Amino acid sequence: MIFKLLSYKIIVIMLFITMISACGSSTDEQEPTTKNIAPVASAGADQQVNEQTNVTLTGMATDADGTIASYSWQQTSGTSVTLNNADTSSSNFDAPDVTQNETLSFTLTVTDNDGASHSDLVEIAVLKVNIRPVANAGDNQDVVTGSTVNLDGSASNDADNDTLTYQWTLVKPETSNAQLTNATMADASFVADIAGTYTASLIVNDGEDQSSASSVVITAVDGNSVSAQINGSIVAFNSSAKTTTIAKDQITITINLLDQNDVIVATATPAVAENKAAGTELRFNSKLTGSNASMVSIDVSSPGFTSSSRRVPLKALINIDAKLQQVTESN
């Protein structure tokens, strides 16, 4: 009985030793597998930009156990834009022209050398920039006293097509009682009650900004006043009867409006301009207004030349020429 018990113990001990030996004798050991850590993308801070400006998206990425293999920018919302260098860490685009403030969204996705990826979102708020409106008060006017002057500001405009409001102001002669009618409308008016110069100015507003002032000059004359536009040309000849040149600052011109009694009712001394297209010809022009005028006299003179004097009936437009002859020096 004792022998059998000893036998069993020996067998169990040998079996246990054999099992331990078998486990410890293996040479095909496996190293533990390391899990790849995904990269981290940063698309940068959100931005506010004005429309039609260039915007830069500055991205960054890190990878704890490897390298960044690729970058990819994509737009995810908003008015479509063209992304430049979308496969690099920094991309850029031109902000669109917007009708109102708008937010554009972009995603940066980075991939590491083991194929793991990560994305981050950035938002760009595109702000609409208001363009100042432009006022247009219309053309200068000549009127007779007592007339209603109609002011037209309808040519004023706003590039953003915003609705405009209008504000007219009037500078009038000292003793005038003229008052604007519809001063906050595109078309205003007033009565030119006395002779003189009136200046009407218009400012328009688009709800955000106002325009610079645009002004129009209204010249009022008495009912019996007459206006004339006088245009003239000057040609000079030398002693051989050939055309010659006179310096424009050597010419003196006097234009008079005369009444029926040859009394001067208005006068002007216009400057002379060159007319290069006509060689040696010079030109002058002036506008005169006078009460009860019926005639126009024009005197042109230059040192060393005979004077030229003309006298013509008054009409709305007068085109007249003056010929100067060089004085022959006597021996």
Image: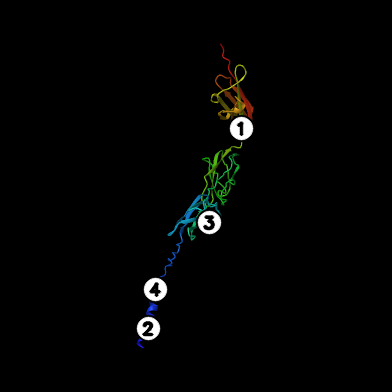
Identify which amino acid the numbered label 3 is placed on: Gln
Q: Quadrant of residue 66?
A: bottom left
Disc 3 target residue: 74
Position of 292 compared to 10: left or right? right
Q: Earlier in the sequence, mark 3 or mark 4?
A: 4
- Say which label, 1 or 3, has the lower sequence index: 3
Work out whether residue 317 can be spotted.
Answer: yes
Query: How far apart are labels 3 and 4 at the CA level?
Result: 61 Å
Q: Which mark is residue 21?
A: 4
- Determine whether, in the image, residue 212 is placed left or right of residue 17: right
Tell me the distance, in whole angstroms, between the alpha carbons under discs 2 and 1.
147 Å
Q: Nearer the viewer, mark 2 or mark 1?
A: 2
Residue identifier under label 1: 229
In the rendered structure, the answer to whether residue 114 lies left or right of residue 18 reads right
The kind of secondary structure element at disc 4 is helix
Q: Residues within 10 Å of mark 3 (few under 14, many from 20)?
A: some
Which image quadrant: the N terminus? bottom left
Mark 2: which secondary structure?
Answer: helix
Q: Indicate which disc, 2 or 1, sits on the residue closer to the N terminus.
A: 2
Of labels 1 and 3, the one closer to you: 3
| CB within 8 Å, label 2 to label 1 | no
Secondary element at image label 3? strand
Task: From the image, state whether disc 3 or disc 4 is nearer to you.
Answer: 4
The residue located at (59%, 28%) in the rendering is 276
